[in-house]
Image (cartoon, rainbow, N blue to C red):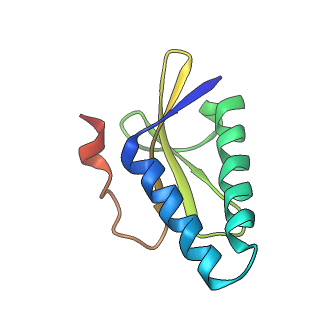
Amino acid sequence: MKFLWNDEALTEYEQAAEYYGLKEIGLDGRFADCIESTIQSVCSSPKMWPIIEDDVRRGVTHTFPYSVVYIQLDQMIVIIAIMHDRREPGYWRNRLE
């Protein structure tokens, strides 16, 4: 299954990768691999992940405290947020409109 980025989600992803890259050399790449692995898992089994609200699901990453928040529209995954798990929950709701 294919996926699309919400612009704000893509920005979150890029900013988080940059943050980790500044913390330690190569950590940005490991973060990106972790997020991309979760996205692949979401795309191959989108209904596997728990619903967190209405039709919104959350794919939890390994190693990093982030989740891929998404919805499935027909045969397309729309990534709504790359959410830090300790951030204010539900901040992404306005992106559903």
Question: Is residue 65 among what the camera can see?
Answer: yes
Q: Identify the residue at image location x=66%, y=32%.
A: 43
Q: Nearer the viewer, residue 63 or 2?
A: 2
Above/below status of 62 relative to 57 = below
**Residue 63 relative to residue 12: left or right:** right
Above/below status of 28 relative to 14 = below
On the rendered image, what quadrant is the C terminus found in? top left
Q: Identify the residue at image location x=60%, y=80%.
A: 22
Residue 49 lies in quadrant? top right
Above/below status of 91 relative to 97 = below
Residue 29 lies in quadrant? bottom right
Horizontal and vertical percent position of residue 3 = 56, 30
Q: Identify the residue at image location x=48%, y=65%.
A: 15
The furthest residue to the bottom: 23
**Residue 13 relative to residue 21: left or right:** left
Q: Nearer the viewer, residue 79 or 17?
A: 17
Horizontal and vertical percent position of residue 53 = 37, 43
Horizontal and vertical percent position of residue 1 = 65, 22
